[in-house]
Image (cartoon, rainbow, N blue to C red):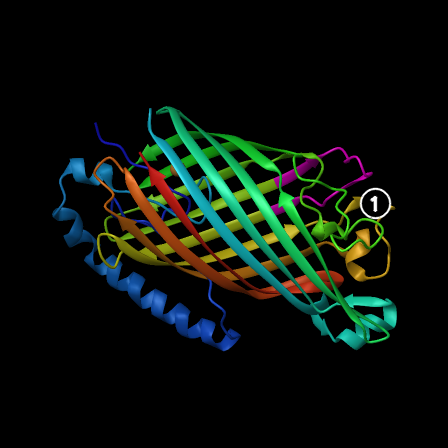
Amino acid sequence: MTRFCIAGDGRFPQKGVARSKGVVVLKIKRHIVFLSLLLSLTLTALGQEEEGLLDLDLEQLMSLDVIQVTIPGAHWHWEDDWMIGYQYVQQHWRGHQSGTRRLSDQEVLKQFPITHERMTMHMHMLMFMHGNSDELTFMAMVPYMEMDMPHLTRQNTTFTTRSEGLGDIQLSAILPVYDEYPHRIQVESGISIPTGSVSVSDLNGRPGHLEYAMQLGSGTFDLRPKLTYLGQTDKLSWGAQARAVVRVGKNSEGYARGNIYGLTTWISPAVTKDFSPSLRIDAQHWGNVRGIDTAIPVANPAAVAGLQGGERVDLLLGLNYGAGVDDEGHGHRFSIEGGVPIYQNLRGPQLRTEFIIGGAWQWTF
Ligand SMILES: [Cu+2]
């Protein structure tokens, strides 16, 4: 029986190739260079596609493997397959923006007694997947968060707040709804459980709760539906995913984080059987906080419920590698991905994203 694991970004046209999406810290002008490079790689791959396919028999085609490792759950598993994985994501914010306009620290300090110079988030996530049957895959994700925020006051003094701990555990069911070479479509029905704290105070003992973005979870049960399209030939994989995070009700502190609506699309030419770079664009809109946590001191913009929403488009570059993945899709996959925003529009003053970088490992057996 042929098996394969279609993963996240659907990058790999070849079985056993792990894909990674990576975004690298780049200056905006360099995006054009990378886009051109990816485009030429893609065109080359497309040009070779027809000939390449002739080299494969039907059995091989069926076992081609689409894996976008850095997009959790962008694949399904076949009956009795297991997968464990680990993903690390680091996001950096630096400086403020209001709408699309950048603000200096001094401009923010005219409105608030305190501003943030930057923020850093590290997310470590354990992933588990199991093919209950060919028609149903279960997934669980357990995140561990670490965040810090250096502050600058009008008196020109600085201090840093930190938070760390378990985030919101996510559970989902993935259902393949279409599988005709070279296209696949899957629906994911997910939920997150409010296991992450929403009453985190500063580890250094400052009074009150930390700002909304520094809390470890949403505090609400969140619906997390996704619709994923995956495409793959032996030379190229591509895909798109629509996602939403919808908060149900309000949390114990009297608010709900804004809903999130995102759309991502990617393309990944196979350079060798096991290696492929990837280019991904991710667009998202997130709403303001609904309600107010009155335990958060309103001394800086990140403490204001109405200054949390925004839109952002990120450009991400990745590298994907599959280590000894066999015909059944079993084996180890690695990927790294990094990116920068190419557009941000923020209900500000709000911290602006500077870059995102991360990596993932998945083992299917
Ligand atoms: Cu998996």
Q: What is the crowding at mark 1: few (fewer than 14 residues within 10 Å), some, or many (at least 20)?
A: many
Give percent across and percent down for residue 153. Answer: 82, 70
Query: Front-most of 214 and 350?
Result: 214
Q: Which residues are magenta?
A: 245-261
Q: Is residue 348 magenta?
A: no
Q: Dividing the picture into quarters, in which one does residue 122 lie?
A: bottom right
Q: Is residue 260 magenta?
A: yes
Give percent across and percent down for residue 343. Answer: 59, 65
Query: Front-most of 320 and 234?
Result: 320
- Quadrant of the picture in which ligand 1 is shown: top left
Quadrant placement of the C terminus: top left
Query: Front-most of 330 and 279?
Result: 330
Quadrant placement of the N terminus: top left
Q: Residue at x 81, y 39 (%)?
A: 253
Give percent across and percent down for residue 304. Answer: 82, 55
Q: Dividing the picture into quarters, in which one does residue 79 lie?
A: top left
Q: Dividing the picture into quarters, in which one does residue 191 lie?
A: top right
Q: Please determine whether, in this image, residue 90 is positioned above or below residue 24.
A: above
Q: Secondary structure at mark 1?
A: loop
Mark 1 residue type: Asp
Q: Is residue 306 left or right of residue 365?
A: right
Q: Residue at x 23, y 49 (%)?
A: 234
| Residue 39 shows up from this direction | yes
Give percent across and percent down for residue 72. Answer: 47, 43
- In the picture of the structure, the residue carrying the numbered disc 1 is 293
Q: Residue at x 77, y 58 (%)?
A: 302
Q: Residue furthest front?
A: 204
Q: Residue at x 77, y 36 (%)?
A: 251
